[in-house]
Image: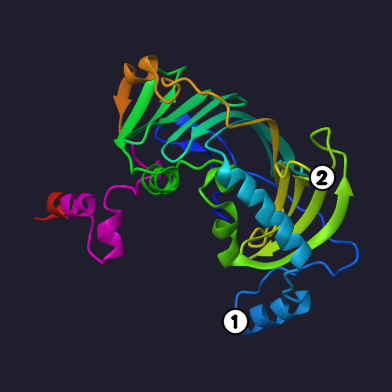
Amino acid sequence: MIRQRSSGLALVVTLAVLIAATARSEESQRKPKAPKRDSQASEAADASVGLALEPGAIDILKAMSTRLAAAKTMSFTAVSTYESPSRLGPPLVYATVAEVTLKRPDKLRVITPGDGPPSEFYYDGKTMMAYEPAANLVAVAEAPPTIDAALRAAYESAAIYFPFNDVVVADPYQDLAPTLKRAFYIGQSRAFGGTMTDMVGILTDQLFGQLWIGAEDKLPRVFRAVYLDDPSRLRQQVEFLNWRLDGEIPANAFASVKAASARRIAFARPDPKPPAGADDAVKGQPSKSSKKAKKRSAP
């Protein structure tokens, strides 16, 4: 599973959609321990949780993946909540809502009305656009010919990440499998989606998570996770609502005239730039400002 606990549309503009999930322990098993920094401790932690892939749990994950991968078109609402530390100590909870529409293999639209600054993302198989309506700013870039490749390019080039990426990729199970270390069946619940769900716990290289998956329709309802490298163990969740598979989608759904006419900005990562002269300092060379100062002080 891809993990990026930062804003979803984090361009130079504040295009925000934050990621999924948190976790609840399996009552009949020991809680997985956070991996240690050194390899020997990491191996000991791995042994303590058993590394079991229960066939029943794997069957449920594969059935969900098959259902999603078979859909030619898909739309749903993703409600993502995540914890963030407060000044008082206990974490606060924030949320974003995203309306998602896709058509396989090469079209995706994500409309995020809130919370936070509204944002829109369009991918039509050739270009991708990240648009902030309030500021009337848009970033546009050429894109690869598949949704999976476009999501990867959007993250690598502009730090754009969606909490539901693992649901919209071409094969969700194969996307998860390389990092999956444990999967176990928990039981059933009617708490989400107005339907009976099967609960599955997972442990990957990055997270300990729990999924609620429709027992009949095999659609994901909730994914909760805690990331193992997070010392605060902050919890994250994405809830999936309003599923619609293989419905008709208008041909113009994956572009926006208004977005295309907005003021252009660079499609680039919003990483902070080092202060002037920092590169020289790292290399052991005096910065330009220090060189100027020496010239001024020279006799």
Q: Residue furthest right?
A: 28
Residue 179 position within the rendered picture, expressed as x and y whole percent measured from the top left: 59, 65
**What colouring style does the render use?**
rainbow
User: Would you identify the image quadrant in which residue 6 lies?
Assistant: top right
Amino acid type assigned to the residue bearing label 2 in the image: Thr
User: Would you identify the image quadrant in which residue 99 lies?
Assistant: top right
Q: Is residue 94 magenta?
A: no
Whether residue 43 is situated above or below residue 156 in the rendered picture = below
Residue 61 position within the rendered picture, expressed as x and y whole percent measured from the top left: 69, 55
Q: Is residue 28 left or right of residue 22?
A: right
Answer whether residue 5 is visible to the viewer in this image: no
Front residue (pair 4, 100):
100
**Which numbered circle lies on residue 197?**
2
Magenta residues (range): 267-293
Q: Residue at x 82, y 67 (%)?
A: 31
Q: Residues within 10 Å of mark 1 (few under 14, many from 20)?
A: few
User: Which image quarter holds the N terminus?
Assistant: bottom right
Q: Is residue 286 magenta?
A: yes
Whether residue 227 is situated above or below residue 133 in the rendered picture = below
Please state which of the two labelled residues, at mark 2 or mark 1, is closer to the viewer: 2
Q: Residue at x 54, y 40 (%)?
A: 162
Q: Is residue 10 left or right of residue 241?
A: left
Amino acid type assigned to the residue bearing label 1 in the image: Ser
| Element carrying mark 2 | strand
Q: Residue at x 76, y 58 (%)?
A: 201
Q: Which residue is mark 1?
A: 39
Residue 208 position within the rendered picture, expressed as x and y whole percent measured from the top left: 71, 59
| Element carrying mark 1 | helix
